[in-house]
Image (cartoon, rainbow, N blue to C red):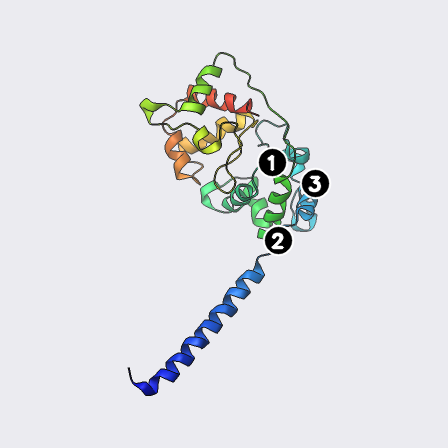
Amino acid sequence: MNRAFLPFAKSLFVALLAVSSIASAAEEAKVVKADPAKGETIFTNGDTSRNIPACVSCHGAAGNSTIVQNPKLSAQHEPYTYKQLMNFRTPERNNPIMSPISKALTEQDMHNIAAWLDKQQPKPGAAKNKASIDLGKKIYRGGIAEKNVPACASCHGASGAGIPAQFARLAGQHQEYTGAQLTAFRAGTRNNSAQMTTIAKRLSDDEIAAVSDYIAGLK
């Protein structure tokens, strides 16, 4: 390299580093800490100015839904809830009710709602079918080796608590809702998790019903 060029190259390098630092600082400035109080306000009251209904009307007080078709959201991990709200904006999880609501929310709204739900106290559910409880327990804890179905507990935990930012909390979820989601994964109408799609395709209707019922009783 020409020695005369070295000072220029050095100056250019320093300038590029400065620009990079400014860009990084700008990106960091965009990240606003979640505000659970604002999340509670939207969850409880909605926002009529943006045509956002109150989440509580479908998902219950503190996220403890009493409508079996609507998921319990209380104590769900913040990153998981945020991801699902974002997914509702895409064909991966198109839903006639949630997709329009998701599109009306800002990403900050989603973080706020998810942060508030994460801190709520969940109410327990209960298994209903004594005849299938052993099968559900076997699938959840040990999987089905002959079908290459892994144990649900390997990702969602022995008690269904899940792993924040990776795997959903399942404990106490309505069996009807869990069963519907597994069926949707199997059919490809919900495709925001390649792993769950693969697993669900290996499960029969009876196996889905059994493991969904077992999950409802986890605490």
Q: Which residue is mark 1?
A: 75
Question: Which of pointers 1 and 3 indicates the residue nearer the eye?
Answer: 1
- Residue type for callout 1: Ala
Which label belongs to residue 44?
Answer: 3
Separation (CA) of disc 2 from disc 1: 19 Å
Q: Is residue 158 left or right of residue 4?
A: right
Q: Position of residue 193 (x, y in %)?
A: 43, 39
User: Is the N terminus in the top left, top right, bottom left or bottom right quadrant?
Assistant: bottom left
Separation (CA) of disc 2 from disc 3: 20 Å
- Residue type for callout 2: Lys
Q: Is residue 11 left or right of residue 47?
A: left
- State yes or no: discs 2 and 1 in contact (Cβ < 8 Å): no
- When the figure is inspected, residue 83 is found, relative to residue 21, above or below; the finding is above
Separation (CA) of disc 1 from disc 3: 16 Å
Pointer 3: residues within 10 angstroms few (<14), some, or many (20+)?
A: some
- When the figure is inspected, residue 201 is found, relative to residue 27, above or below; the finding is above
- Counting residues from the N terminus, which is met first, the one under dot 2 or under dot 1? 2
Q: Position of residue 138 (x, y in %)?
A: 43, 19
58 or 121: which is nearer to us?
A: 121
- Residue type for callout 3: Thr
Q: Position of residue 54 (x, y in %)?
A: 67, 41
Pointer 1: residues within 10 angstroms few (<14), some, or many (20+)?
A: many
